[in-house]
Image (spheres, rainbow, N blue to C red):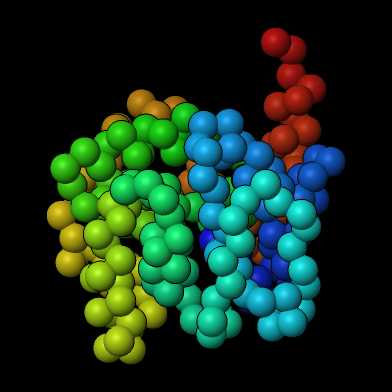
């Protein structure tokens, strides 16, 4: 998902540099290691005030800009070719493709596999069955825009902290960047990791 306003960041998060590439390029490249079908849901360039770089992905534009992640999920599920779709924000610099695969595998015969960390669902880093699109559309028709509102309507496999740490020991995939301080801290962590002896 790359269609947010990035208000707190003050700049488009998708285009922030992380090493030699932008965050959106890093995310797409990482997911392309394991998925043949990667979809980016974004605001139209004129509406967002920026254009995405060339990506090895299908780009789906929000018909109404900045309507929130519930609409973006519905659009992504509609465009997805597979039955299960992994969903993430564009600003998760430590996401590993193996975490995405693990969440997709956890869906099994559920509607979705969603982490529950510190008592809070994390629906922006989760896997959904394509059939969730109808519930999302019903909520949107009623004026709902919050992705969290979808959770009670689904048969959810909950991944608690223990289960998530089996996939992602440091819960790094849940790190996202909302402010310039978050961004600077993530860059420092990345530089430290690269300079640490192996």
**Residue 165 visible:** no
Which residue lies most toward the right here? 20
State which quarter of the image contains the N terminus: bottom right
In the rendered image, the vertical position of residue 76 relative to residue 6, given as above or below: above
Residue at the spot 69% in from the left edge and 59% down from the top edge? 14
Q: Which of 111 and 14 is in front in this view?
A: 111
Considering every residue shown, the one lying at the far front of the view is: 81
**Quarter of the image holding residue 94?**
top right
- Residue at the spot 40% in from the left edge and 64% down from the top edge: 78
Q: Where is residue 137 in the image (x, y as percent from the top left)?
A: 30, 76
Residue closest to the far top: 198
The picture places residue 33, in percent across and down from the top left corner, at 58, 31
Camera-side residue of 106 and 161? 106
* Residue 167 horizontal/vertical position (percent): 39, 29
Residue at the location (84% across, 41% down)? 20
Viewer can see residue 108: yes
Q: In this view, does 175 lie to the left or right of 80?
A: right
Question: Which residue lies at the image location 43% right of the left edge and 54% below the top edge?
Answer: 80
Residue 130 position (above or below residue 138): above
Q: In which quarter of the image is the C terminus?
A: top right
- Count every numbered label the image shows and give the total: 0
Above or below residue 8? Residue 118 is above
Q: Where is residue 149 in the image (x, y as percent from the top left)?
A: 28, 72
164 versus 136 height, above or below: above
């Amino acid at each position: 998902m790359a269609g947010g306003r990035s208000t707190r960041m003050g700049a488009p998060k998708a285009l922030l540099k992380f090493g030699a590439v932008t965050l959106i390029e890093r995310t797409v490249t990482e997911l392309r290691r394991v998925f043949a079908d990667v979809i980016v849901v974004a605001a139209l360039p004129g509406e967002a005030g920026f254009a995405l770089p060339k990506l090895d992905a299908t780009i789906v534009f929000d018909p109404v800009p900045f309507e929130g992640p519930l609409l973006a999920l519905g659009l992504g599920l509609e465009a997805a070719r597979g039955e299960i779709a992994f969903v993430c924000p564009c600003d998760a610099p430590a996401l590993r493709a193996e975490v995405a695969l693990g969440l997709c595998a956890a869906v099994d015969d559920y509607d979705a596999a969603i982490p529950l960390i510190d008592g809070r669902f994390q629906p922006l880093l989760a896997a959904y069955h394509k059939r969730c699109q109808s519930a999302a559309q019903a909520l949107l028709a009623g004026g709902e825009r919050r992705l969290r509102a979808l959770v009670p309507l689904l048969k959810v496999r909950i991944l608690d902290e223990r289960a998530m740490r089996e996939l992602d020991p440091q819960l790094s995939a849940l790190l996202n960047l909302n402010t310039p301080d978050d961004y600077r801290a993530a860059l420092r962590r990345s530089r430290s990791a690269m300079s640490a002896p192996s």
